[in-house]
Amino acid sequence: YLRFKGGEVVEARAEVGEEYLLAALATDEGARRLGEVGIGTNFGLTRPTGLILLDEKMGGTVHLALGRSYPETGGKNPSALHWDLVLSLREGSLLLDGEPLVERGRFVGVPEPHPLVP
């Protein structure tokens, strides 16, 4: 569980690996800041591959990185940490300012795309 305020983790806990999570967040001053956010829209990827650069784009997921952002994309957060985390939203939701943005892996209010043809 991560709770953010102003782009910074203000509360963190985990059922497994909490000690590791808290140690990562203590890496340096920038480690608690959000370095990247992405919503996966590639529904051609149907299961995790183990390659984070693909998995973070899988449809029905959200990913974020704690720590360093990329200066080449306008990011301004320096940190020794850049930790990509991917979460399935196929059975959950993503809220933006308390309002649902993604539910069950799909953007709210956006029509379902046509099914992929094999």
Image: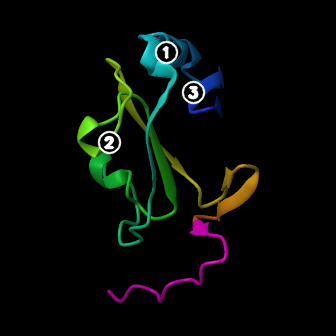
Marks 2 and 1 sit apart, C-alpha to C-alpha, by 29 Å
Of the pair 91 and 94, the residue shown nearer to us: 94
Q: Which residue is mark 3?
A: 8
* Kind of residue indicated by mark 3: Glu
Image quadrant containing the N terminus: top right
Answer with left or right where residue 79 lies relative to residue 112.
Answer: left
Q: Give, as a single range, the part of the protein colored magenta.
A: 106-118
Q: Nearer the viewer, mark 3 or mark 1?
A: 3
Q: Which numbered disc, 3 or 1, marks the residue that appears first in the sequence?
A: 3
Q: Which residue is mark 1?
A: 20
From what the image shows, is residue 112 above or below residue 58?
Answer: below
As helix, strand or loop, the secondary structure at mark 1 comes to: helix
Q: Main secondary structure of the magenta part?
A: loop
Image coordinates for residue 45, horizontal then vertical, percent: 36, 66
Image coordinates for residue 69, horizontal then vertical, percent: 35, 34
Indicate whether residue 70 is drawn in magenta.
no
Marks 3 and 1 sit apart, C-alpha to C-alpha, by 18 Å
Q: Is residue 13 visible?
A: no
Of the pair 13 and 25, the residue shown nearer to us: 25
The picture quadrant where one finds residue 14 is top right
* Kind of residue indicated by mark 1: Tyr
Q: Which numbered disc, 3 or 2, marks the residue that appears first in the sequence?
A: 3
* Kind of residue indicated by mark 2: Gly
Dots 3 and 2: beta carbons under 8 Å? Answer: no
Of the pair 53 and 47, the residue shown nearer to us: 53
As helix, strand or loop, the secondary structure at mark 3 comes to: strand
From what the image shows, is residue 73 above or below residue 100?
Answer: above
Q: Which mark is residue 74?
A: 2
Dots 3 and 1: beta carbons under 8 Å? Answer: no
As helix, strand or loop, the secondary structure at mark 2 comes to: loop
Image quadrant containing the C terminus: bottom left
Residue at the image point whose x is 36% and y is 72% from the top: 44
